Amino acid sequence: HVNPVIDIIKNLKVAEDRKIWINVDGLHQTELIESLGQVFGVHPLVLEDILDTTQRPKTESYDDYIYITIRTMFYERLENAVDSDQISIILGNNFILSFQEMETDLFKKIRQRMERPAGNIRKKGVDYLTYSLIDSIVDNYYLLLEDIGEEIERLEDELIKEPAPATLQSIHELKREMIILRRSLWPLREIIASLQRDESGLIRESTGIYLRDLYDHSIQVIETVETYREMLSGMLDLYISTVSNRMNEVMKVLTIIATIFIPLTFIAGIYGMNFEYMPELKWEWGYPAVMIFMATISVIMLYYFKKKTWL
Amino acid sequence: HVNPVIDIIKNLKVAEDRKIWINVDGLHQTELIESLGQVFGVHPLVLEDILDTTQRPKTESYDDYIYITIRTMFYERLENAVDSDQISIILGNNFILSFQEMETDLFKKIRQRMERPAGNIRKKGVDYLTYSLIDSIVDNYYLLLEDIGEEIERLEDELIKEPAPATLQSIHELKREMIILRRSLWPLREIIASLQRDESGLIRESTGIYLRDLYDHSIQVIETVETYREMLSGMLDLYISTVSNRMNEVMKVLTIIATIFIPLTFIAGIYGMNFEYMPELKWEWGYPAVMIFMATISVIMLYYFKKKTWL
Amino acid sequence: HVNPVIDIIKNLKVAEDRKIWINVDGLHQTELIESLGQVFGVHPLVLEDILDTTQRPKTESYDDYIYITIRTMFYERLENAVDSDQISIILGNNFILSFQEMETDLFKKIRQRMERPAGNIRKKGVDYLTYSLIDSIVDNYYLLLEDIGEEIERLEDELIKEPAPATLQSIHELKREMIILRRSLWPLREIIASLQRDESGLIRESTGIYLRDLYDHSIQVIETVETYREMLSGMLDLYISTVSNRMNEVMKVLTIIATIFIPLTFIAGIYGMNFEYMPELKWEWGYPAVMIFMATISVIMLYYFKKKTWL
Amino acid sequence: HVNPVIDIIKNLKVAEDRKIWINVDGLHQTELIESLGQVFGVHPLVLEDILDTTQRPKTESYDDYIYITIRTMFYERLENAVDSDQISIILGNNFILSFQEMETDLFKKIRQRMERPAGNIRKKGVDYLTYSLIDSIVDNYYLLLEDIGEEIERLEDELIKEPAPATLQSIHELKREMIILRRSLWPLREIIASLQRDESGLIRESTGIYLRDLYDHSIQVIETVETYREMLSGMLDLYISTVSNRMNEVMKVLTIIATIFIPLTFIAGIYGMNFEYMPELKWEWGYPAVMIFMATISVIMLYYFKKKTWL
Amino acid sequence: HVNPVIDIIKNLKVAEDRKIWINVDGLHQTELIESLGQVFGVHPLVLEDILDTTQRPKTESYDDYIYITIRTMFYERLENAVDSDQISIILGNNFILSFQEMETDLFKKIRQRMERPAGNIRKKGVDYLTYSLIDSIVDNYYLLLEDIGEEIERLEDELIKEPAPATLQSIHELKREMIILRRSLWPLREIIASLQRDESGLIRESTGIYLRDLYDHSIQVIETVETYREMLSGMLDLYISTVSNRMNEVMKVLTIIATIFIPLTFIAGIYGMNFEYMPELKWEWGYPAVMIFMATISVIMLYYFKKKTWL
């Protein structure tokens, strides 16, 4: 069932001045991908890398094409987790092959812009299209970080108002997501930088200015991730300090209650003893005297706590 | 309503040896800004960047102008927060365009110096004026850091005298502000460094010596921020240690009280039992003997605590 | 008993266009290894390094061979520890000598691929074989990290459900293994990079593309180790916070119980005193009145705890 | 009142082969400093920098002189704080101008060495004198660090013997001083390095060997500061651990006492109840039986604590 | 008394093709050292550095000799401290001067190897001897780290089995020793690297291969120190967590005992009150009913603790 598609592509390729963009959603169609590779002369090692979805983002220059593999990420707010999707792009002289692990809306806007006949994007060549594809991936990171930023703000509010173990768990999870995000963003920056320095001639100078802009965006995304990481670390520290503070407060209440009543209970215990010869028990004013003595002790204790600023 | 302004500018521009500085306060007048861009031949990407107020500070060289975008910051002491304002500068051959997100007093002094006919600043050209604009932004950081420095000192005093959870909260907030400050200061330093290395010819050698000075100032600002960060981290550690110390003290008081009175209460409890055959209860000296025994235990306990330096 | 083996090798070496791979399992046969060294003209310092199993992974270029020493690692899940095994490779013009500290299955697959007469590996020369050997070592690290990744996930689950001191111990042990792993992985990356830059002519250009792939894999392994380290650090922090949380909870229960019952016990103690003149004791409603008073105090206390969100 | 001094200096300057060193103590004589600047042709920006005592240490090359500004520090043991003093040096072809913020003994020894007619220092020229001035500043750092080293040792002893909150406060203060010290030492090293690389011809090759030595000293000073910082961080950690340990010990004492006596008090409370039908109370051996029972419980408890190594 | 020694040395020096190694143990013989300096034409600054035993390890190239100063260290297990000893080496064209702060066995083996007439070391020249001297210093670091490694293992065992404050103290001390070790090892590596790059011609190419080996060893020593530091940091964290865990356990025992017995004691206290009108006291089944009620409360409490996994 692959052949007819491949045949059409072969025919398209014959017309030399045509520019072709082929996008493959889903990597299960290995046969189709291999045929595509053969038609466009892609090295078997590259095809292997495209099909292996645990690739580190990277770019590799070959004789007549550039191979780029990037990771795009989606934030699942309910699970407080980040999902990722590998996207591979092969930029040739007048063709682009793009491979997505899953079917997403990522390139939808680009497709819409290309359908308009007067679209700028149609005129600007395959290197500009490559830029547009990577740009839409970087934009997706912006959206992702905006969502995470909102979540961080929500957690920060929670932390100040009423910190719960679940807050701690969420901060910890977000921090781990930041580690994962960073791990795929640093190579992304390297990829864009290496496209800027490209010497193969596949990327024209006029596209360079857009790549410089893209590079700035990728740095901004990385800096945001680093800022979030530091903020989350600060929040963890604050959480621990807050728990420590609360424990201190709990301890103070316990200590105040215990320190006032334990001595008083002891005094009551003394006059609860059953010795036959306890003269105080027979005094008419014994009971009120003991009560006043106890009240005095309480007042002294409370004054002592007041001075220690425990109250 | 824009046209008359633009027409005047066009007329000014015709006279080639004139130097023009146009400052736009507020970025809502997009139409005006676009017209300005057309008059001075600014790339559409640059105009987009000027209108987007979430830009990372950066500088970009174009064929006949340099585009600079910087962030200036204001410290709101009441909210213990830092507000920021994006400023874009376009330095051409004999013109400067500056765009401010909000109307501020930042360039007021420069305007006053320019109004004086004998002013040095009028003679020195647009590159010197660019230096002056950036210099006033860096000076503003100095003021900001002075305010924050005072706040840090106040918090440090509070920390030693009477640490409260609110102190912790303030330290945490200031630390976060430092992260944000740093994030806009590092690129500022890069911007000044890249202006120093400028090869476009738009910045004359005589301005270089001022830029070197400015570069030193930017480093000093960054180092101050780093120092403040370390100081705030140290204060957080101190806070936690102090809370820990206080808890220790609270625990000691509780333990001393409990350890002395719990055994005594037990002894009183023994002689409060109602057994018929308890010979001690009948002894004439039973009561004073028990009291002396209790006093002895207390003294031994207090001596033990003294030896352990808990008192 | 060594001579016959050495003689065969000498004979093989005479035929100049033959490619030889000799693998030595176990380093106790020092005599054999020295003879091999003499036959292939290996420097005595290199032979010393091969026999010393505490070498840091490194590569050294000599006039007509490259000496590589790497460390492969095995994860013992039961002991939660990582064992290591030193592998030395000498790549000459048309020979490879490999030395393993212990007999392992590491090169089994390569041997199987070589036994097949049509095997690709037989045609590609000794530099490709060197790549294959190192590749199998790097692949082994992948397996190791997968095992450790599973263990980390198991510990994370344990941490959330029911953290025990044993969990802490395991996290600590894994973190230490990460330090050891990293220590042998960073030089491994350097080795591959220096093979890529090789100028001796022993590594052909066609093998370079495979080394680039291998280099990417080595970076990915290192990044995984770094990610695991950060995750384990995060888990340690979470453990401490969780223990702190639990202690807080324990303290609250103690404080609530003590704060409610210590004052009540004191009141009961008062009416347990044996004074002759205590009018309350004679009142008919004394007992129920005291009971109601006690209940009131309890309710007030519980309301206070509710307000403090301790309940 | 300035003129006569300036006139003398002018006259001195006429004699071309004379070498002049002018040292100004205190920066309040702005008029004198400005006159000096005019006589020796110093740039107004440099004069401004000399008078601004919050300068970051730096060196700047001008056409015919080098401007150096350094910070010297003094340790006030009583206040446990570090005071600083800005020193500016202008090295010309055959003159040195030095400016000190306050009058100190720093250059006293150099002055004494210069007064001796046979002094080596008189022959070696103004670049060697500049070296001597900076050397005396670096030597002053050695003295400062020796004082701080002694203070650290004293605090470490205190920490082991009897840690008090004041110890914590002192460690924290010293750590902050280290941050400040480091901030002025790193640029000092840069200054010496840039003097070594000097291309203006004002520093002769024969002085280079002394600057190399000075550079080594500056590195040693920086490393000492870094070592002290790490030691102080370690001491803070140790302090927290020690406090934690002590709290643990306090808790154990409380728990042992409470765990033994609370159950015993309960048993005593039982037989203190006033029920009419309590057969035990009438038994002849009831009292001793209860006492033996209580002793048994105590022994069991103590054995349990022994086994848990709490005793 | 120095002269005769110096005379012999002078005579030896006349014979140009002789190689001389002079080793001075102890730096108190300043007169001898100065005479030696004069005979071999050593710069006065170098002699000063040799006599100053607080030098940072470094190497300096002079016109016809290389000056090297290194620090060797000895681990005193009893005091858990590291002692250090400064060693200076001057490598000339055909002579080596070595100066040791104290008399040690460090160079004993080299002396023995040189006494054997057929010794390899005698033939290989003074640069190889320099290598041998530094090699014996690096080997000494290996021994030192082996001792420390054993101590770390011992402490780790102690930490798991029975952590005591003394364990904490030892870990802290070892960590500080690591800071000191590192401080002298980093420059050692630099020294060896700079000897490898030597351009003076004093170090022949044939010695380069040995220096490369030595460089690897120095890196391995540094990495071991870094690994130990990280392990010790991990152990400190583990210690704090363990203490925290134990405190948690102590708190649980206290809370369980207090939470069960405080309410029971309160109930006993109620029926110990002396009100005249307490109907329960007259009931025949009052006493057993209260006992059963108390038992029920205990069982409920124990079940609650079981559910909370506190038991």
Image (cartoon, coloured by chain):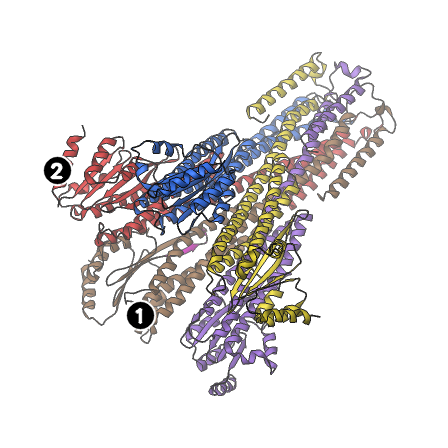
Chain colours: A yellow, B blue, C purple, D red, E brown
Q: Quadrant of residue B214?
A: top left
Majority secondary structure in the magenta region: strand
Q: Is residue B297 above or below residue D63?
A: above
B59 or B265, nearer to the observer: B59
Stretch in magenta: E71-78
Q: Residue furthest top?
A: A284
Pointer 1 indicates a residue of which chain?
E
**Which amino acid lies under the numbered mark 1 shown in the image of this protein?**
Arg
For the residues marked 2 and 1, what is the alpha-carbon distance in whole angstroms?
59 Å
Q: Is residue B94 magenta?
A: no
Q: Which residue is mark 2?
A: D11
Chain that bears disc 2: D
> Does the CB distance between marks 2 and 1 fall below 8 Å?
no
| Residue D131, image x, y percentages | 25, 47
Judge the density around disc 1: few (<14), some (14-19), many (≥20) Cα neighbours within 10 Å: some
Please name whichever residue, A196 or D308, is drawn nearer the observer in this view of the structure: A196
Q: Nearer the viewer, mark 2 or mark 1?
A: 2
Label 2's element?
helix
Considering depth in this image, is D63 or E28 the residue closer to the camera? D63
Q: Secondary structure at mark 1?
A: loop
> Observer-nearest residue: D234 or B83?
B83
The residue carrying mark 1 is: E204
Compared with D14, A199 (above or below) is: below
